[in-house]
């Protein structure tokens, strides 16, 4: 029996023992067709899903490679049925292809007549198809390219889209690499995307997704529409593009609630596009305003449903999705696959951290005991009020202060969800508060001051969950949140993961009230972070050592013996 | 030496050598048990229709085609050369082998001229796929057949040609609604088809032969040579081991679930759809898979009906033994159960005549032919060298050639092969080494062949900071039991992923674990350092747990008489019951209720056990178990083949009996014990045919025996009628009262040859 690092489970999860000598090789072999689900300390879990297998097929891997990788690295015999299932699933991709035909336009062609017959008879698909050309091909209404791909995926026969893209209106864009260089993985991501035509690049927060977008634009050299989550993120993009490319201020337009500029490169927010008045989307013409050569979707995992619908009509344009995680809490990963494209590049957080591009992070949960009065209030509260009472307990305040005192020189963020609590914290810590109602101008002013080191501590609300860029935040303290949402956690952690100038460690604190709902949610968070492979420590508030003390933030462990 | 060819089957048998007789008995073992007393008895046993059918069923298509030639010949008796001439496309060696097989089995007899015994003629209903003669069908064919056939339209001719193919009997279509007449009905009116019952018609032989032209026996039926699929045996075995691991794991999980919550027994037998769905959900498999696992566990004797009212499906006592065995033995139990099982799991979910889907474990799934079919299918694969085999379709067509008369039984073969693949007996059409072991040496052979391929059980886990515990292989059963309490299974397969959660820790505490027990346990079984988060979790839950005192004790003693309880508590004789006072009126003990009862009784008290409802029990209930089937005789219906010494002894016995028979001929007849009815009948039939008088030993209705010479006339319905010479009258004799028969003064010249 071989002694491989991989164990194949019957539910198609793969367990990879990371300390095994062959682990690295094995990870490289399984990465194309298995999604990393959890990466705790010793054994990583990957999952083989149909989508992952099709992603692999789209990237040019065949079933034989997949089966070989499983069999070669598996410690135990792999059930034959599982291998057959893998091969069958992969075989379903590419039976149908979408291509341009010089005579008939867009045509769906099949190498397997039975499949085409099944598809043509499907109620969901039939209305999108036109006349039958011959036994193996059928005309597709050009406007239905996206919806057809979506529908085909749903019935389990994903189509390979070879219909190509329009070039769009040309516009010269160059990367200006005079004082920086594209990192290897960023270059690989751009190459992977460009070779595939359209698709999604998965990179952790802080790994420089914006630059991947800029490099893709430089490759396309065409007018580009960039869709971002909010205005601040949009300004961020604009700043980066001006700094890193040949584009000038005049060439970049902002299309948001405040301004409606359409320029060769236009940055629009999801919100403005999905704004409806009298039941109609008012800004759809944006998509036709220019002959766009490239559309960039920032934070694909947050892409709202209406944009999916609009994207279905944009299938002839190149599409680049950028995200830190393909996990969508609404489970619409398959729409991302069929409408934006398959995953083209993927690098796990830990690998990039190991290369020194993102800061190593330490996660600490600080447990606070509520005083008797608070406990009584909590005990008698209505269920829906309980979390708020536990999360905003006044007993947390001294602990938060003490945490900040541990890192007197570090730029720190205090993140919370309840405005009352944030205001109180702002007063107590003498720090400015940024929340939803803070104007964009005010925000940028504070961020600039923070970046310059004039302000050491910022108190921020949920707005911090999305694309704001605070390069020097080294400490984050979260005091309350949205019921332990994994996505929120990933974003907040991302705040402190930007590489530090001197390679210092990042600290991510969570202050929770012991024995309440707060600590229950903290358990979700803990599991998520541990699954991502972060060291997670639980400390009692009373044991929280200050600088210079045993177990303090600068304490170096002596060898145990 | 006389040169006349033997005139009857019995006489021909007498000319066969001992080896040839042995071969006959070996090929048709049903006639050898019990041993026939002589050759005449053997001949009449060979004539029994059931035996003939059985022998014919085992012949392949090529051999049956040779037989067809003899059966269809216009004369009784065909020379071997004539057979070869009738089948010009069949190679000589195939023909010779076929004739050899037929004569060995006495389905044809004779040396220079081959004859078919009447029972064989009767058993082959449609020789070469041709119908009966027109005369037998009471059909008057037109004089000029050729001309009549030439006048038929294309549709009608099509019908005739179809019936002239493999099967001369066809289904008469319903009368169309427009009142028109179908071609078949027109043919019926024209007298070219015969109606044999309300629904079916038969094509007379003459028309069939006419349509077949110069190939009256159809195309030669040679052995199909399907493409051989080849896989490297090592890889086959590894994949088989994967399947084996999966099967054992899933059956174990299934029984674990049923142990916690048994499935209900339907009134019609079997497991209900709701239970099936529940099991599928809990096992994370499809419903058909759940049904298959249930069937597998049942045929392996691990699951049966039990419970206090015998209305639940429960793991059997055999399960307790099974789960302690190593993986190889566990797999072998499953595989052997499947191989010999008389059930067809693939029928689950199919609709019966009434349109009702068949439930898993339903008695409707029993097919007594199943083990024989399963074995014969796998035996075909076993003939191929290791690493090669056949695709399922090819295997079925080969089986159909081998036993064409049993082709209707082959329907379940593809499903059986799929089951074999799930078990790891067959991988991609190739028999695994373990499968070969199973076929050749049964359960032990299977276990032995697969043992080296299955992982050794592990006795540790890897604890991770995300509170998962990973058992990197199959667990030793003791650890598996413990982990089932303290953690939940998240994923199973080669390894098992457990997750420790608040709920699972609470469950462990409910089971009487303390926080320190859990800490110790995790430290002991984890290869990796126990993560801080896990310790915190245990402590957190334990702290909450302590507020409501939920302890775990085995038994209590309660009484309204507080004085009595104090007396018990202070009684030294009752000290071994380890009692302590929990509250006024209640003593508790860490010992089991039965132990405490015994101690108190010994100490002279009169305690009574009670159930949670407070009702008095005589003894605490044990865990429920189904009785299971008793290990008994091998359920395989395949008869044990005769051994060489047995064959030799039987032949010897027959020869002796034969000698005795011929020596007695001509002398006064005594009652000869051991003469069977069959041989009596044989002799009587011969006498009727030849018009010879016989000596008859007869016991009349009053019980008095007599011997008389009778000129037999007919043998009908169990009665022999004839002319009784001594009494000078016609008489009727009940066959069952005839004690002995012998021919009178005949065959003296035969006696010399036999002796």
Image: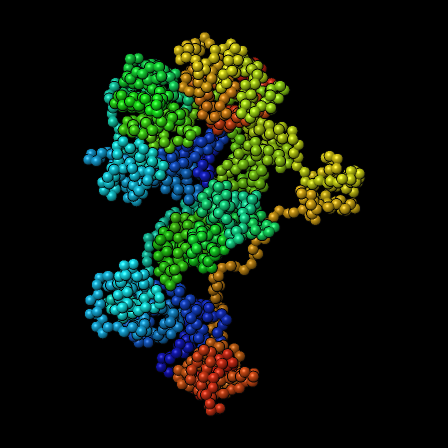
Residue placed most toward the observer, A558 or A372: A372
Residue drawn 20% across and 67% down? Answer: B150
Q: Is residue A504 visible?
A: no
| Coordinates of residue B465 in the picture (x, y in percent) | 52, 28
| Coordinates of residue A116 in the picture (x, y in percent) | 29, 42
Could you tell whether B212 is left or right of A68 in the image? left
Q: Quadrant of the N terminus of chain B?
A: bottom left
Q: Above or below — where is B509 with respect to B35?
A: above
> Number of labelled discs?
0
Q: Above or below — where is B163 with respect to A89?
A: below
| Coordinates of residue B335 in the picture (x, y in percent) | 48, 51
Residue placed most toward the observer, A281 or A133: A281
| Coordinates of residue B51 in the picture (x, y in percent) | 43, 69
Residue drawn 27% across and 33% down? Answer: A162
Q: Above or below — where is A345 with respect to B313?
A: above
Q: Place residue A373 in its image quadrant.
A: top right
Q: Residue furthest top?
A: A454
Residue drawn 35% across and 67% down? Answer: B197
Q: Place residue A445 in its image quadrant.
A: top left
């Amino acid at each position: 029996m071989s002694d491989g690092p991989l164990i194949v489970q019957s539910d198609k999860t793969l367990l990879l023992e990371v300390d095994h000598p062959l682990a690295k090789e094995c990870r490289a072999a399984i990465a194309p067709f298995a999604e990393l689900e959890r990466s705790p300390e010793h054994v990583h879990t990957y999952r083989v899903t149909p989508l992952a297998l099709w992603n692999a097929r789209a990237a040019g891997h065949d079933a034989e490679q997949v089966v070989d990788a499983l069999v070669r690295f598996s410690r135990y015999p792999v059930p034959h049925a599982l291998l057959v299932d893998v091969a069958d699933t992969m075989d379903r991709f590419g039976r149908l292809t979408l291509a341009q035909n010089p005579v008939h336009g867009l045509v769906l062609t099949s190498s397997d007549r039975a499949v085409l017959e099944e598809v043509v008879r499907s109620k969901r698909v039939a209305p999108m198809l036109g006349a039958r050309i011959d036994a193996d091909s059928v005309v597709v209404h050009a406007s239905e390219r996206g919806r057809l791909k979506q529908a085909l995926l749903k019935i389990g026969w994903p189509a390979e889209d070879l219909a190509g893209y329009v070039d769009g209106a040309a516009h010269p864009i160059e990367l200006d690499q005079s004082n920086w260089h594209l990192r290897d993985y960023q270059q690989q991501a751009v190459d992977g995307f460009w070779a595939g035509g359209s698709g999604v690049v998965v990179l952790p927060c802080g790994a420089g997704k914006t630059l991947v977008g800029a490099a893709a634009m430089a490759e396309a050299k065409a007018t580009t529409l960039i869709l971002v989550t909010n205005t601040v993120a949009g300004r961020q993009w604009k700043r980066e593009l001006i700094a890193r490319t040949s584009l000038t201020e005049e060439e970049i337009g902002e299309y948001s609630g405040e301004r409606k500029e359409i320029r060769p490169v236009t940055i629009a927010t999801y919100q403005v596009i999905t704004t409806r008045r009298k039941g109609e989307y008012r800004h759809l013409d944006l998509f036709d305003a220019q002959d766009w050569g490239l559309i960039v979707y920032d934070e694909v995992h947050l892409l709202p449903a209406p944009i999916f619908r609009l994207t279905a009509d944009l299938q002839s344009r190149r599409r680049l999705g950028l995200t830190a995680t393909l996990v969508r809490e609404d489970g619409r990963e398959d729409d991302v696959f069929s409408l934006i494209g398959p995953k083209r590049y993927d690098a796990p957080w830990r690998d990039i951290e190991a290369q020194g591009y993102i800061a190593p992070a330490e996660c600490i949960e600080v447990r606070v005991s509520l005083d008797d009065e608070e406990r009584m209030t909590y005990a008698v509260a209505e269920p829906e009020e309980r979390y708020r009472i536990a999360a905003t307990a006044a007993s947390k305040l001294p602990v938060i202060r003490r945490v900040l005192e541990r890192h007197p020189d570090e730029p720190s963020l205090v993140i919370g969800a309840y405005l009352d609590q944030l205001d109180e914290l702002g007063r107590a810590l003498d720090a400015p508060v940024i929340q939803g109602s803070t104007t964009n101008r005010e925000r940028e002013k504070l961020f600039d001051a923070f970046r310059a080191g004039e302000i050491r501590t910022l108190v921020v609300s949920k707005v911090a969950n999305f694309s704001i860029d605070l390069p020097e935040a080294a400490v984050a303290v979260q005091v309350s949140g949205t019921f332990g949402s994994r996505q929120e956690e990933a974003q907040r952690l991302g705040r402190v993961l930007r590489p530090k100038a001197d390679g210092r460690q990042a600290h991510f604190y969570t202050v929770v009230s012991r024995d309440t709902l707060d600590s229950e949610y903290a358990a979700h968070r803990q599991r998520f972070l541990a699954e991502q492979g972060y060291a997670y420590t639980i400390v009692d508030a009373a044991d929280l050592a200050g600088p210079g003390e045993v177990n303090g933030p600068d304490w170096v462990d002596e060898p145990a013996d | 030496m006389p040169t006349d060819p033997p005139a009857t089957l019995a006489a021909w048998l007498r000319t066969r050598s001992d080896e040839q007789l042995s071969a006959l008995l070996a090929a048709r073992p049903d006639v050898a048990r019990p041993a026939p007393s002589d050759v005449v008895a053997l001949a009449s046993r060979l004539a029994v229709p059931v035996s003939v059918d059985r022998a014919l069923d085992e012949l392949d298509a090529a051999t049956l085609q040779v037989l067809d030639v003899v059966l269809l010949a216009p004369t009784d008796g065909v020379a071997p050369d004539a057979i070869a001439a009738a089948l010009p496309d069949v190679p000589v060696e195939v023909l010779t082998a076929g004739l050899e097989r037929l004569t060995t089995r006495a389905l044809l007899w004779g040396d220079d001229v081959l004859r078919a015994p009447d029972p064989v003629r009767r058993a082959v209903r449609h020789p070469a796929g041709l119908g009966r003669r027109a005369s037998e069908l009471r059909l008057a064919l037109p004089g000029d057949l050729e001309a009549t056939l030439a006048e038929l339209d294309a549709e009608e001719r099509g019908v005739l040609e179809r019936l002239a193919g493999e099967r001369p009997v066809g289904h008469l279509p319903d009368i169309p609604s427009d009142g028109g007449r179908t071609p078949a009905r027109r043919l019926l009116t024209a007298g070219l088809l015969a109606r044999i019952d309300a629904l079916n018609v038969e094509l007379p032989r003459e028309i069939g032969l006419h349509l077949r032209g110069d190939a009256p026996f159809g195309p030669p039926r040679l052995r199909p040579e399907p493409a051989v699929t080849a896989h490297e045996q090592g890889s086959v075995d590894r994949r088989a081991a994967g399947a084996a691991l999966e099967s054992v794991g899933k059956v174990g999980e299934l029984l674990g679930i049923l142990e916690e919550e048994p499935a209900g027994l339907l009134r019609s037998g079997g497991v209900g759809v709701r239970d099936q769905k529940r099991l599928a959900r809990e096992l994370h498999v499809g419903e058909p898979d759940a049904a298959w696992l249930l069937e597998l566990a049942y045929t392996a004797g691990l699951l049966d009906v039990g419970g206090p009212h015998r209305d639940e499906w429960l793991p059997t006592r055999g399960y307790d033994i099974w789960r302690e065995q190593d993986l190889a033995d566990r797999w072998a139990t499953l595989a052997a159960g499947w191989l010999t099982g008389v059930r067809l799991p693939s029928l689950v979910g199919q609709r019966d005549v009434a349109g009702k889907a068949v439930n898993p474990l339903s008695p409707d799934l029993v097919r007594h032919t199943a083990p024989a079919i399963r074995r014969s299918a796998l035996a075909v694969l076993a003939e191929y060298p290791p690493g090669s085999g056949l695709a399922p379709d090819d295997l079925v067509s080969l089986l159909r050639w081998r036993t064409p008369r049993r082709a209707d039984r082959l329907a379940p073969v593809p499903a059986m092969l799929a089951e074999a693949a799930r078990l790891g007996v067959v991988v991609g059409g190739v028999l695994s080494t373990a499968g070969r072991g199973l076929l050749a040496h049964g359960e032990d052979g299977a276990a032995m062949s697969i043992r080296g391929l299955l992982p050794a059980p592990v006795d540790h886990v890897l604890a991770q900071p995300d509170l998962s515990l990973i058992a990197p292989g199959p667990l030793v059963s003791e650890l598996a039991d413990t982990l089932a309490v303290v953690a939940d299974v998240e994923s199973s397969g080669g390894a098992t992923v457990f997750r420790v959660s608040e709920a699972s820790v609470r469950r462990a505490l409910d089971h009487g674990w303390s926080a320190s027990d859990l800490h110790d346990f995790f430290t002991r079984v984890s290869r990796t350092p126990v993560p801080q988060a896990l310790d915190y979790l245990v402590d957190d839950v334990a702290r909450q747990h302590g507020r409501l005192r939920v302890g775990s004790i085995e038994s209590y003693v309660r009484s309204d008489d507080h004085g009595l309880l104090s007396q018990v508590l202070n009684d030294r004789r009752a000290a071994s019951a380890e009692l302590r006072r929990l509250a006024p009126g209640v003593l508790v003990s860490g010992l089991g209720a039965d132990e405490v009862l015994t101690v108190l009784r010994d100490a002279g008290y009169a305690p009574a056990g009670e159930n949670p409802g407070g009702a008095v029990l005589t003894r605490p209930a044990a865990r429920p178990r189904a009785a299971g089937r008793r290990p008994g005789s091998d359920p395989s219906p395949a008869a044990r083949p005769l051994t060489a010494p047995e064959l030799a002894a039987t032949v010897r016995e027959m020869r002796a009996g034969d000698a005795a028979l011929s020596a007695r001929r001509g002398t006064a007849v005594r009652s000869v014990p051991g003469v069977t009815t069959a041989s009596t009948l044989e002799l009587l039939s011969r006498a009727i045919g030849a018009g010879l008088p016989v000596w008859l030993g007869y016991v009349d209705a009053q019980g008095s025996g007599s011997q008389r010479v009778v000129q037999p006339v007919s043998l009908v319905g169990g009665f022999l009628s004839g002319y009784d010479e001594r009494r000078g009258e016609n008489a009727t004799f009940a066959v069952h009262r005839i004690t002995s028969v012998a021919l009178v003064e005949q065959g003296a010249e035969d006696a010399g040859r036999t002796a």
